[in-house]
Image (cartoon, rainbow, N blue to C red):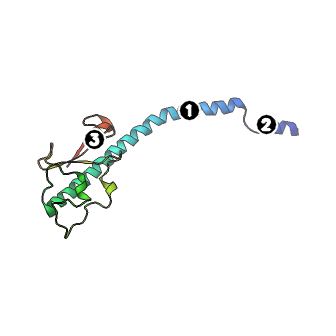
Amino acid sequence: MKQRQRQNKGFTIIEVLVIVVILGVIAMIITPRILGRIGQAKTSAAASTAASLANAVRMFSIDHGMPERGSTIDILWEKPGSVADEGWEPYVDKPDDLLDPWGRPFVLKVPGERNIDFDIVSYGSDGQPGGEGDAADIIKP
C-alpha cells in the first residue's frame, strides 16, 4: 500500500506534456493581441504627449514670441539664444518629456505643414515619415 502511494504522487510525463502544449497554444493565441495593444497604447501616449507639448509651445510663443524657423523641440527645455535670461523657465519638467514613447525626440516644425504656425510630430514606431498603424505619423495640435 505504501508503494502505491509513492507511485501516485506527482504527474506523469504525459500529463506534463499535455499541460505544456495547452499553455503553448494559449500563449500563441494571446501574445499577438497583447503586442497589438502595446502598439496602440504607445500611439495613444504619443498623441497625448504631443498635445501637451503643443500647449507648451503655445505658452512659449505667448511669453517669447513664435519660435524661429528651424527651432527644435529643445526650446522647451533649453533657453534659446534669442530669449532674455530674466524670467526664463523651462516649459517641461525634464528633458525626457521631449521624447516620444519609442525614445526619439518629438519634432517641432515651424511653420507647420498641417497647421499654420507649428506642428509637433512623432514619426511613430518606425521613426520614418508616413506609415500605418503604430508606425503612422502623429501630428499635433
Lower position in the chain sequence, tag 3 or tag 1? 1
Disc 3 to disc 1, C-alpha distance: 35 Å
- Residue at the image point whose x is 31% and y is 37% from the top: 135
Mark 1 Cα-neighbour bin, 10 Å: few <14, some 14–19, many ≥20: few
The answer to which of marks 2 and 3 sits earlier in the sequence is 2
The x and y percentages for residue 42 are: 35, 45
Q: Residue at x 22, y 61 (%)?
A: 79
Q: Secondary structure at mark 3?
A: loop
Seen at 71% across and 31% down, the residue is: 13
Figure label count: 3
| In the image, farthest residue toward the right | 1
Mark 2: few/some/many CA within 10 Å (<14, 14-19, 20+): few
Q: Which residue is mark 1?
A: 24
Left or right position of 85 against 100: left
Mark closest to the chain's N terminus, 2 or 1: 2
Specify whether 67 is left or right of 47: left
Residue extending farthest front: 81
Mark 2 or 3: in front is 3
Q: Residue drawn 15% across and 59% down?
A: 61
The residue at which mark 3 appears reads as 123
Where's residue 1, x and y in %?
Answer: 88, 38
Mark 1 residue element: helix
Q: Nearer the viewer, residue 8 or 32?
A: 32
* Distance in Å between CA atoms under marks 2 and 3: 60 Å
Tell whether 42 sits left or right of 117: right
Check disc 2 and give the amino acid type.
Asn
Q: From this view, report whether residue 11 is shown above or below residue 107.
A: above
Residue behind mark 2: 8
* Callouts 2 and 3 close, C-beta under 8 Å: no
